[in-house]
Amino acid sequence: MDGIEITEMVAAGAAVLLVLALLGTYLRRRLIAAGAPMFVCAYRRPGRASWRYGLARFESEHLVVFPLSGATLQPSHRVSRTGMALLHAGEPARGQAPLVEDPVVVALSDSGRQLEMVLPRDSYTAVRSWHEASPPGWPPRVA
């Protein structure tokens, strides 16, 4: 084998690895979506400085958040619909929010566990509506 053949084999191997990584990312996204719409968000526990990007989706009784990257199909956070409290929502401080279009910073609590999220404004509206509505099969909430 000469140098050109080895270079071609390395390039072909790198291309195959790239295609496999992209395919794996696509399949993971399809599996965690479970046929439901998802939205991009950033999240962190209070007191932590760094934000992590994630994908969130609504289930009938939970808001689930998955890390944007990784191989796991398990959510990193699961917030109960009935135990959830919206503690605070507002505009992010300058330079505070990650790269989320038209961001809203939301502080959530679920049975004493807190989670901060940065959501696009339309996704924040969806979270509020989902939280205020009754889950399927439950009696309607009356204010």
Image: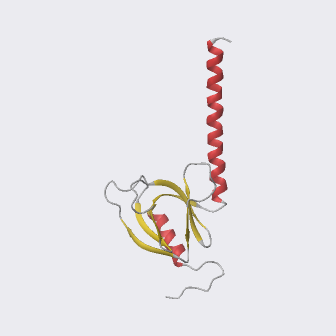
Q: Is residue 80 left or right of residue 103?
A: right
Which residue is pictured at 66% across the width and 32% down the height? 16
Q: How many marks?
A: 0
Residue furthest left as drawn: 94
- Against 49, residue 79 (above or below) is below
For residue 137, which quarter of the picture? Answer: bottom right
- Against 5, residue 70 (above or below) is below
Q: Position of residue 30 (x, y in %)?
A: 65, 53
- Against 96, residue 17 (above or below) is above
Residue furthest top as drawn: 2
Q: Position of residue 100 (x, y in %)?
A: 43, 55
For residue 47, which quarter of the picture? Answer: bottom left
Which residue is pictured at 62% across the width and 40% down the height? 21
Quadrant, the N terminus: top right
Residue furthest bottom as drawn: 142
Q: Position of residue 5 (x, y in %)?
A: 66, 16
Here the colouring is secondary structure
Q: Position of residue 20 (x, y in %)?
A: 66, 39
Depth check: give the residue in front, 76 or 130: 76
Which residue is pictured at 33% across the width and 53% down the height? 95
